[in-house]
């Protein structure tokens, strides 16, 4: 297979202990995993970052330890600073600036930031030019021409479109090869494709990160009371399966695939890894290597 799939995995702070055990397994037993895929980045943010958005991670893991782990295994660390409600006053936040200062480096594996706010995008380009930027799916870009404009922006290495554009194949075929490399598809979203309040959900997380009053927004999507279920995501018309990646997207020249999962627990992250990265004949081996580690709380 000519093209290789680059996966972007969730929860670099929240699931640090999980990745501390999984990444060595991925390196030492590469035969367990498909040779046509790699782990390109792990994304996330520690608790109480006012620039944070998308999801709230519950973790106080030492950022230096997180960064050291990912650098050891050549995986890019991508800070999720996708708060959509930032103002100029928020740019001076000491904690978020310290994280950016720590994560920008001259190493072989550059690190990045997932952004929504135009104010923050400009600030990061000026203050931390060594960090690459990713345009967040929290922008909810559902119009293809608006997406093309976003992809054409030089500020962004990758752009994550709204998941409802995933299978718009007649439109994706119109992109040039270089632009296809900038598209990072969100594969396993469980949200209803008919949801009209997705942006409001993301804004509610942004409000929480900033300590603003609750807007009283509540998700009213069908089956939302059950929370995230991978089985439901697989039934979604927007779901990107492993067969889709192998047989459709990679041959078309698309190589970047994002797996959501912050806040879902490391047991669910393991299920995503088993599905998207692990050869079927070795899935039990990977499960046992992880489950039999008595030091790891998977739930």
Image (tube, rainbow, N blue to C red):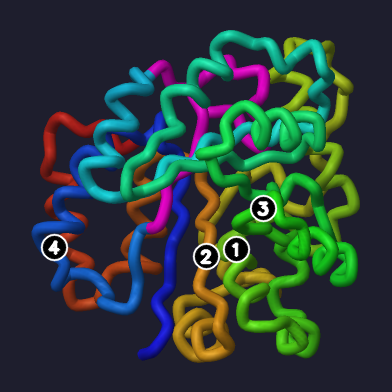
Tell which of 35 and 216 is nearer to you: 35
Residue receiving disc 2: 257
Q: Which residue is mark 3?
A: 156
- Mark 3 and mark 1 in contact? Answer it, CB < 8 Å: no
Query: Residue placed at 70% from the left, 50% from the top?
Result: 155
Question: Is label 3 or label 1 in front?
Answer: 3
Spatial separation of the CA atoms under disc 2 and disc 1 = 5 Å
Q: Residues within 10 Å of mark 3 (few under 14, many from 20)?
A: some
Disc 2 is placed on an element classified as strand
List x then y, in percent, for residue 154.
71, 56
Q: Secondary structure at mark 4?
A: helix
Asked whether residue 21 is drawn in magenta, I would say no
User: 232 and 138: which one is in front?
Assistant: 138
- Using the numbered discs, state the Cα–Cα distance from disc 4 to disc 3 in whole angstroms: 38 Å
Compare marks 2 and 1 and give the one earlier in the sequence. Answer: 1
Residue of label 1: 184
């Amino acid at each position: 297979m000519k093209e290789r799939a680059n996966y972007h995995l969730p929860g670099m702070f929240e699931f640090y202990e999980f990745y501390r055990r999984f990444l060595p397994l991925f390196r030492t037993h590469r035969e367990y995993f498909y040779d046509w895929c790699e782990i390109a980045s792990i994304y996330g943010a520690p608790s109480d970052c006012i620039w944070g958005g998308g999801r709230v991670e519950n973790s106080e893991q030492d950022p230096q330890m997180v960064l050291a782990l990912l650098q050891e295994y050549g995986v890019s660390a991508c800070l999720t600073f996708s708060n959509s409600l930032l103002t100029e006053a928020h740019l001076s936040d000491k904690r978020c600036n310290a994280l950016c200062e720590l994560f920008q480096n001259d190493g072989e594996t550059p690190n990045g930031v997932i952004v929504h706010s135009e104010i923050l995008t400009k600030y990061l380009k000026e203050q931390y030019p060594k960090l690459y930027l990713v345009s967040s799916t929290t922008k909810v870009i559902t119009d293809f021409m608006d997406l093309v404009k976003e992809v054409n922006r030089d500020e962004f290495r990758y752009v994550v479109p709204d998941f409802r554009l995933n299978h718009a194949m007649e439109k994706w075929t119109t992109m040039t090869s270089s632009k296809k490399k900038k598209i990072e598809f969100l594969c396993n979203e469980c949200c209803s494709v008919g949801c009209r309040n997705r942006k409001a959900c993301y804004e509610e997380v942004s409000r929480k990160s900033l300590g603003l009053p609750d807007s009283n927004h509540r998700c009213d999507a069908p089956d939302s009371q059950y929370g995230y279920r991978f089985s439901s995501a697989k039934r979604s018309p927007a779901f990107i399966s492993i067969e889709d990646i192998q047989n459709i997207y990679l041959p078309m020249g698309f190589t970047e695939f994002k797996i959501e999962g912050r806040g879902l627990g490391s047991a669910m992250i393991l299920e995503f890894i088993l599905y998207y990265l692990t050869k079927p004949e070795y899935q039990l081996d990977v499960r046992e290597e992880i489950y039999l580690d008595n030091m790891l709380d998977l739930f």
